[in-house]
Amino acid sequence: MLKFSDIKPKIENLTKIGEGWRAVVYRGNFEGQDLAFKVASEDIHKHPIQKEGIILQQVNKHGIGSVYKFSGEDFIAYQYIDGKPLNEVLNKDNYKHLITQLLDQGFILDTLKIDKGEMHRPYTNVLVDKNQKLYLIDFERATKSLKPKNVLNIVQFISRGLKNKEELIRLLKIYKSQQSQENFEKLKSYVLAVLLP
């Protein structure tokens, strides 16, 4: 199976753009494409990187995440996103637009039975491009789940500081018991009307 070291000499303008405890992320031009490469930092982290590639392919079919290109034994390659973290661009003018996208993508993940993780603090694992399009990134901690909590975690994130939560809690419980389109739309309408006036 192909390793990152096999293709590394063929990547132009290779630059390290990020590093976590499981992987190093590079940006470079490969066969005319501007790509990001997530490379396992150690052999023990190869499996989560490969799993992320599989999940990325699934969510790409629904317009979520950066576009998966190919993978190898110790890396995945995907379209580079020229964007900034959500916490750097979120303001009162774009809040409703970006939070709507975040909720909609969270619901799609819920219907796919994929729990992304870290959605209760979607700061650096959500990028926004210059056209205000929102991208979920970093699916290495994502898991298959019968009861994913993406929407629930996003609503918890955006409702911090809200004083009267009785109606919100009621709608969250209904959604939690049945993650249907109808229940999601009711919850989303309430959130957008009350939390984002």
Image (cartoon, helix red, strand yellow):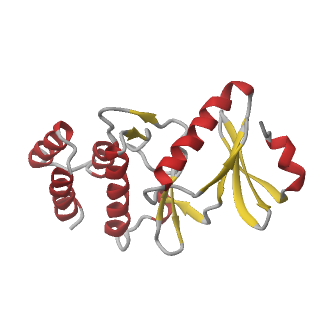
Number of marks: 0
Q: Quadrant of the N terminus?
A: top right
Identified at 31% across, 51% down, the residue is 107
Apparent side of residue 166 relative to residue 99 in the rendered image (left or right): left
Quarter of the image with the C terminus in it? bottom left
Q: Residue at x 48, y 48 (%)?
A: 58
User: Where in the figure is residue 142, as x and y percent of width and height?
Assistant: 47, 37
Residue 172 x, y percent position in the rendering: 18, 43
Q: Quadrant of residue 105?
A: bottom left
Which one is in front, 144 or 174?
Answer: 144
Work out whether residue 134 or residue 162 is closer to the camera in this orientation and state it. 134
Q: What residue lies at 37% left-to-right and 62% top-to-bottom?
A: 101
With 8 as the anchor, is 86 left or right in this view?
left
Q: Residue furthest right?
A: 9
- Residue lying at the far top of the rendered structure: 44
| Picture quadrant where residue 76 is located | top right
Where residue 15 appears, as percent x and y from the top left, is 79, 55
Residue 132 in picture, x, y percent from top left: 46, 71
For residue 67, side relative to residue 72 (left or right): left
Tell me which residue sits at (43%, 38%) in the image.
117
Please say if 133 is above or below 44: below
- Relative to 71, say whether 65 is above or below: below
Left or right: residue 57 compared with residue 147: right
